[in-house]
Amino acid sequence: MGLVLLIVVGVAAGFLATRIMGLNTDVLTTVAIGVAGALMGGLALRTIGMIGGWMAGFVGAVLGALILIWLWKTYIR
């Protein structure tokens, strides 16, 4: 099922991308461009999501620590 979905999304993405960029290609080239773009885009988004998820957790931890320090300095001291 994943391969069929990749091809369908690739066809749609390739058609849209070739029209936006002003290319006049045949169907097979359009599908190849779309499938390759879907693979590259999917990999890039997964990588960004993985790094972003880790970084978001780190930023959240730092912000939480800063808030705790501020609360301690403001109300406990």
Image (spheres, grey):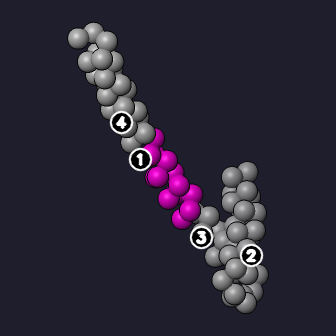
Number of other residues with Cα within 10 Å of mark 1, as a class: few under 14, some 14 to 19, many 20 or more: few
Give the mark nearest the N terminus, 1 or 4: 1
Q: Which residue is mark 4?
A: 58
Quadrant of the rendered structure where residue 38 is?
A: bottom right
* Disc 2 versus disc 4: nearer the observer: 4
**Picture disc at residue 15:** 2
- Above or below: residue 72 compared with residue 14: above
The furthest residue to the top: 76
Number of other residues with Cα within 10 Å of mark 2, as a class: few under 14, some 14 to 19, many 20 or more: many
Label 2: element kind = helix
Give the mark nearest the N terminus, 2 or 4: 2
Asked whether the beta carbons under mark 3 and mark 2 sit within 8 Å of each other, the answer is no
As shown in the figure, which amino acid type bears the numbered disc 4?
Phe
As shown in the figure, which amino acid type bears the numbered disc 3?
Ala
Label 3: element kind = helix
- On the image, the x and y values in percent for residue 64 come to 37, 26
Residue range highlighted in magenta: 40-53
Which residue sits at x=31%, y=12%? Answer: 75
Which residue sits at x=69%, y=88%? Answer: 23
* Disc 4 versus disc 3: nearer the observer: 4
Q: Which residue is mark 3?
A: 36
